[in-house]
Amino acid sequence: MTERLPLFPLNTVLFPEGRLPLRVFEARYMDMVTRCLREGAAFGVCAIAAGEEVGAAAVPCLVGTEARIDDCDMSEPGILSLVTRGERRFRIRDHEVQPDGLLVGEVSWLPDLPHEDIPDAQADLIPLLTGILGELGDRVARPYRLDDAAWVGARYSELLPIPTKARQALLELDDVVSRLEIIQTYLRQHQLLPNAVP
């Protein structure tokens, strides 16, 4: 089963339960946001595989995340400021560009990642993330679930200073423990975590 979903290709990656502020000014996206607000609907955020955020419709990566609008404000004329949160992951099966330039996808929903406890081998990730969350405050959506490997991996994936391509690969990964292992390796390589004791 597939579902039609308006798509917003961006130079970023949204993760389930993540928080993404957006500034919307192009007519196609203003119309999309207006429809979503009126109908209580969501749209899809996907990283750009080729093209640009502004202008002609970009080619999206095939896996993205449903975005729900939590807050909307027009503090500047002609610019909508949104706060969105990530919900389900999806895979684009087909897509088309509408006459107004909006990309619409036929998407299928990917299974939710299972809750798994943090393995002992990755327990050193928790104090560092706890400190980061304390500094970021409400820029990270609550509730915090520091005992959930999927949640911890998603928060690191969106916060680390890594290329969009690497972030996208982490989004597409279904094995939540493997994702933690990759993140742990990165943090150790960059001396943000102590190396494992042999």
Image (tube, rainbow, N blue to C red):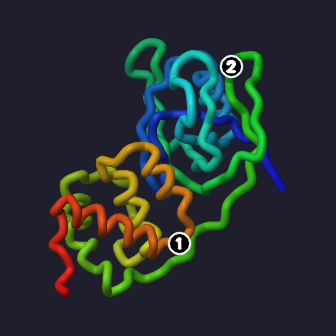
Q: Decide which of 33, 172 is in the foreground and name it.
A: 172
Q: Is residue 11 left or right of residue 26?
A: left
Image vertical order of residue 74 relative to residue 143, above or below? above
Disc nearer the start of the sequence (1/2): 2
Q: Residue at x 71, y 17 (%)?
A: 100
What residue appears at the point 76 percent right and 17 percent down from the top-left corner? 99
Q: Position of residue 31 (x, y in %)?
A: 64, 22
Q: Which residue is mark 2?
A: 101
Q: Quadrant of residue 129?
A: bottom left
Would residue 114 be found to the left or right of residue 73 on screen?
right
Does 24 sit above or below residue 183?
above
Furthest toward the right, the residue is: 1
Identity, as a three-letter code, of the amino acid under mark 1: Asp
Image position, residue 61 (x, y; %)? 60, 42
Locate residue 49: give its quadrant.
top right
Q: Which mark is residue 175?
A: 1
Residue sitting at 76 percent across and 23 percent down? 98
Q: Residue furthest top?
A: 77
Mark 1–mark 2 Cα distance, whole angstroms, equals: 36 Å
Q: Secondary structure at mark 2?
A: loop
Q: Is residue 31 left or right of residue 197?
A: right
